[in-house]
Amino acid sequence: MLSSTLLKGNRHIVRAATSRYYFSTGPAVVFDLSGSFQTHNLETAPNETTECSKDELWNMFELMYTMRRMEITCDNEYKARNIRGFCHLYDGQEAVATGILQALDEKDSYITSYRCHCIALARGGSVKQVVAELFGFEDGMTKGKGGSMHFYNKKHNFYGGQGIVGAQVPVGAGLAFANKYNTPPGERMPVAIGCYGDGAANQGQIWEAANMASLWKLPMIFCIENNQYGMGTSIDRHSSHSDYYKMGNHIPGVRIDGMNVLAVREGMRFVKDYCASGQGPMYVEMMTYRYHGHSMSDPGTTYRNREEIAFTRSTRDPLEFVKKCLVDAEFATPDELKEAEKRIRKDVQQQVMEAKESAKPSMDSLFEDIFAKDLVSRSGSEFPPHIRMPDYAKSFWIDGKPE
Ligand SMILES: Cc1ncc(C[n+]2csc(CCOP(=O)(O)OP(=O)(O)O)c2C)c(N)n1
Ligand SMILES: [Mg+2]
């Protein structure tokens, strides 16, 4: 059942602003996090209490509710055929990204899988930019040329959005290498976090990246978002074990309640401290759940039942949890929360309308922002040589049969 425990009240903390979702001032209360963590190969552990101010908690709620509404809107727009192609939604997992983003800052590199809309939103994006990208419009975060799986924001150190399962992990280790390389010896390093799913976690490339990260003591966080399922396959069917936080073997690990945003934030502060101080990488397992199917082509109910989804929603929902924390701490009344939800819903709707007013990218722009720019003919009749176009001569059909 959802429970938040307050320990004692009214301590003052101030944290510097780094973006609209990070600022915080004002009195704080202390929340109990006991039972939220399990550790592997570690002598210390994350704090089992956390201080949180009113502004911080409101920020987390507002970001998480915006994520939830944005994903629900994407679902509707997909069903209305305004969004085509792949589309993997993040609802249910909002506390994971939000807590991570609260514990890290924008100097830390972030890379993730195809389930990336909400991270793009929080790392310098807007609902309009995310949704416009899904529509394939030029106001989108990657100018309408990336789509659902390929968000990217270098200014905010967000490196995507990867369609190939697990591919982001070695790239993440490369980002960690760069962060170490560019930091003077002895100084705290920015960390890199590579998020991937339980289904990806047994891939060979991840072991290889972990080996190098450990050997070179890279500030790399191997973050497994364990939502209990790969693409239609439960962890019992696809993994010979289920203790993902122990998968680094000698690399230390932490398992965190990924439905409790305060536990994610506190746990990730601990992990960041460890990795930034030069002790090497760490494995993190976030215990979470996704409400939608794997992607839009998966109803999500053939390999799990509706009761399981309903039970998780009613007992572990990350948004209901943060709302309960706000009310318990007397940071908000239920009416204030309803008002805020109404305001956010309206704002998301408004931004989606604005996204719809954007246009398709021009034909010319299709060949911009690619490495092989110089090879491109601008005549419009030729394509860059590295793009294999259909051979119409071979695919010409006469009377329903190939020529
Ligand atoms: C190399 C590769 N193999 C297979 C796929 C197809 N595929 C996409 S997601 C997925 C399952 C991944 O599950 P998990 O890692 O648990 O992530 P989740 O979708 O649950 O977030 C598969 C098999 C792919 N995109 N890339
Ligand atoms: Mg999964």
Image: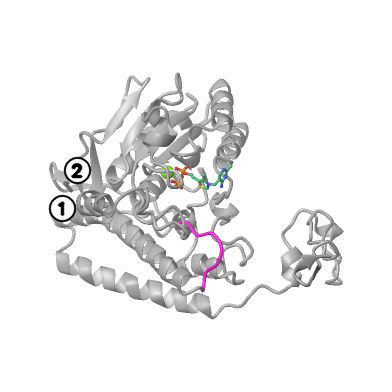
Percent of width and height locating residue 221: 47, 35
Say which quarter of the image contains residue 203: top right
Can the viewer see residue 25? Answer: no
Q: Is residue 4 above or below residue 331?
A: above
Q: Residue type at mark 1: give it.
A: Ala
Image marks 2 and 1: residues in contact by CB distance under 8 Å: yes
Residue at the image position 46 percent from the left and 60 percent from the top: 296
Q: Which residue is mark 1?
A: 329
Residue 394, x across and y down, in percent: 83, 61
Mark 1 surroundings within 10 Å by alpha-carbon count, few (fewer than 14), some (14 through 19), many (20 or more): many
Decide: is 151 above or below 108.
below
Q: Is residue 266 above or below residue 353?
A: above
Disc 2 residue type?
A: Phe
Q: Nearer the viewer, residue 12 or 100?
A: 100
Corner quadrant of residue 253? top left
Tell me where the magenta segment starts and ends, as one range: 82-88
Total of numbered circles in the picture? 2
Residue 15, horizontal then vertical, whole percent: 35, 48
In this view, the residue in front, 241 or 18, is 241
Given residues 136 and 54, the one toward you in this image is 136
Residue occupying image coordinates x 48% and y 41%? 196
| N-terminal label among 2 and 1 | 2
Q: Callout 2: few (<14), some (14-19), or many (20+) C-alpha neighbours within 10 Å? A: many
Residue 311's x, y, as percent? 22, 51
Measuring 62% from the left and 66% from the top, which residue is drawn there?
Answer: 143
Q: Would you place residue 343 above or below residue 185 in this image?
A: below
Residue where numbered disc 2 is placed:
31
Horizontal arrangement in the rendering, residue 375 relative to residue 85 (left or right) = right
The quadrant of the picture showing ligand 2 is top left
